[in-house]
Image (cartoon, rainbow, N blue to C red):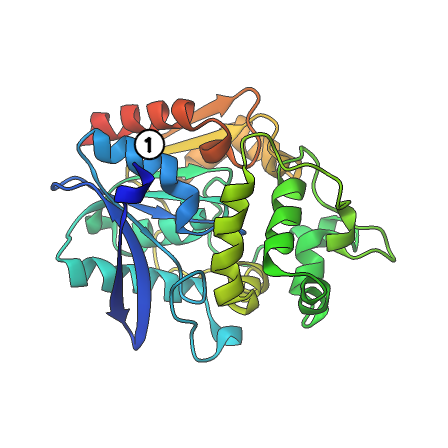
């Protein structure tokens, strides 16, 4: 059914933004991808939710995949992603939505839910919980080779990625992010060199999948992707007023997700501290889940997501 997914380009703020769409009806779900993902990461969820009566939309962020890049990628921000989403919804005449964000997609999902709370019916995030607005500085507590610290250094990731084609970069990141340890390079090692060329892809990620990702990143490159999320993290997102998210929310975490190893992250989630910021939050743990649960265990994730959506339509 993947071939039934429709593709359109929506003009927003002088850019043509690509949106994949499947399903119809008044109950709308918008998927917000992470890195090194793209609209395609949501293929399994789009089919399942459309089959259950939901209208699904999966945009490529500005500078990702088939969407136009911003004129100055180094100035892109999370606020741009929120405003782009407003533009997409307004263009399509959609008032209220459910938001589902994976990885750093949790940031624009929750930011949108704070700024435009009247337009949000519920929020689901996978792999990353709600992080209060402000600078995110995990690198202060981790070795110099921490992948985010490396990718925040102007020119370093560009040189590292530039030795390889886009498909190989995506392959390496998928392998690294599928592990249960934070990617931390040795002092004289680049992040891309942490993966041997003979290392197989995760069993749930096919060569055909990699081909799709490779083509999309070949078109867009990585300039905007390095800015948002990684280089923007240092400034963080800014919110005027109440940072509490009161919409119904669901967090799905794989027990083997490397994000649990981020400083204080596991305690923040398991102790219930996160619920202080998202009082209507439900948390589900997938025992064998990695950072890519939506692709690794799509049937299980789809079941959890549909159960949440049906409670709140």
From the top left corner, tell me how far across and down residue 87 is, in percent.
24, 64
- Determine the residue positioned at 54% across, 37% down: 206
* Residue closer to the observer: 67 or 182: 67
Could you say whether the residue bearing mark 1 is in a helix, strand or loop? Answer: loop
- Determine the residue positioned at 47% across, 34% down: 295
Horizontal arrangement in the rendering, residue 218 relative to residue 48 (left or right): right
Residue 312, picture quadrant: top left
Mark 1 — residue? 280
Residue 278, picture quadrant: top left
Horizontal arrangement in the rendering, residue 91 relative to residue 105 (left or right): left
296 over 93 or under it: above or below:
above
From the top left corner, tell me how far across and down residue 95 is, in percent.
15, 52
From the top left corner, tell me how far across and down residue 214 is, in percent.
54, 55
The residue furthest bottom is: 71
Q: Is residue 243 visible?
A: no
* Residue closer to the observer: 258 or 160: 160
């Amino acid at each position: 059914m993947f071939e039934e997914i429709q593709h359109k380009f929506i003009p927003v703020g002088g850019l043509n933004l690509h949106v994949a769409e499947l399903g119809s009806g008044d109950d709308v779900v918008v998927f917000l991808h992470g890195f090194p993902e793209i609209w395609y990461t949501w293929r399994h969820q789009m089919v399942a939710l459309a089959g259950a009566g939901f209208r699904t939309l999966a945009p490529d962020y500005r500078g990702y995949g088939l969407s136009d890049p911003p004129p100055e990628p180094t100035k892109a921000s999370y606020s741009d992603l929120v405003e782009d989403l407003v533009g997409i919804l307004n263009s399509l005449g959609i008032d209220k939505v459910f938001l589902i964000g994976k990885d750093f997609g949790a940031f624009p999902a929750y930011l949108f839910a704070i700024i435009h709370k009247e337009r949000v019916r519920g929020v689901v995030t996978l792999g990353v919980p709600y992080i209060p607005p402000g600078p995110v500085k995990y690198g202060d507590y981790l070795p110099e080779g921490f992948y985010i610290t490396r990718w925040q250094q102007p020119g370093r990731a560009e040189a590292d990625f530039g030795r390889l084609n886009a498909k190989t970069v995506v392959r390496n990141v998928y392998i690294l992010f599928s592990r249960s340890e934070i990617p931390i390079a040795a002092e004289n090692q680049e992040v891309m060199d942490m993966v041997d060329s003979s290392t197989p892809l995760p069993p749930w990620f096919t060569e055909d999948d990699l081909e799709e990702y490779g083509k999309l990143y070949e078109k867009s490159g990585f300039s905007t992707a390095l800015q948002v999320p990684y280089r923007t993290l240092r400034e963080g997102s800014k919110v005027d007023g109440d940072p509490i998210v009161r919409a119904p929310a669901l967090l799905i975490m794989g027990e083997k997700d490397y994000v649990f190893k981020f400083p204080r992250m596991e305690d923040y989630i398991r102790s219930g501290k996160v619920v202080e910021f998202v009082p209507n939050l439900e948390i589900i743990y997938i025992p064998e889940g990695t950072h890519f649960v939506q692709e690794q265990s799509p049937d299980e994730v789809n079941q959890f997501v549909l159960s949440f959506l049906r409670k709140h339509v």
